[in-house]
Image (cartoon, rainbow, N blue to C red):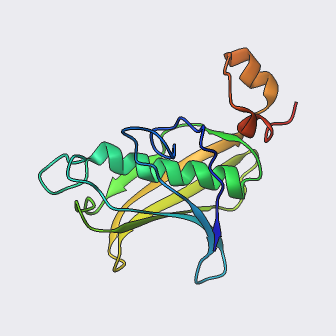
Amino acid sequence: MVVLENPPENPCFGCGPHHARGLRLEFTKEVGSDGVDEIRTSFTPHADEIGWPGLFHTGLHFTVLYEVSYWTALTLGGRLMVSTGPGTYAHQRLPRVGRPHVARARIAPWDGATRMIRATTETADGKPCGTLETSWRFVDRTELDRAGLQLPDYLLSEVPP
């Protein structure tokens, strides 16, 4: 297991380590039981993160799945990528408030310039909660400049000119 570096200046709601109201997710790179690299995060929904009483809010559940997908794209994809669409989200059961859960994601075999990432969440005892499949593509500096995005140096260092 390798803990992934997350700079303290990261402003993200999902993974920013100092975001006042955020999820503050932390990620590790691990090798799955089948020998395939994956990115993981553990989370325990809080009482103020509900949709229905006792259940993690659906949008926050999606956020966890999307965050682990992003970190998978960045870490296993080798450089900064952007999502090309929301993909397919489904849940069998929403995570329960106060109980630990795991989210994990893997990058699928390459398909040209697009990378498919499949993320899952499950309870601590392995019961499936949800899935998210998203497509990602590499981004270059010209595209970022055209969009007017001012990314922090730690992300720009991953983007070729």
Image quarter (top left, top right, bottom left or bottom right) of the N terminus: bottom right
Between residue 10 and residue 77, name the one nearer to us. 10
**Visible residue check, residue 116:** no
What residue is shown at x 48% (from left), y 42% (from top)?
18
Q: Quadrant of the C terminus?
A: top right
- Give how far across and how far down residue 23 sits, in percent: 40, 48
Q: Is residue 128 above or below residue 82?
A: below
Where is residue 72? Give x, y as percent. Answer: 62, 56
The quarter of the picture where residue 156 lies is top right
What residue do we see at 68% from left, 49% from top? Answer: 74
State left or right for residue 84 relative to residue 80.
left
Q: In the displayed structure, does residue 79 sit left or right of residue 45?
A: right
Q: Residue at x 26, y 54 (%)?
A: 46
Q: Position of residue 147 (x, y in %)?
A: 67, 17
Q: Is residue 57 visible?
A: yes
Up the image or down, 31 lies above or below 90; here it is below
Residue at image point 72% right, 42% down: 80
Picture quadrant where residue 140 is located? top right
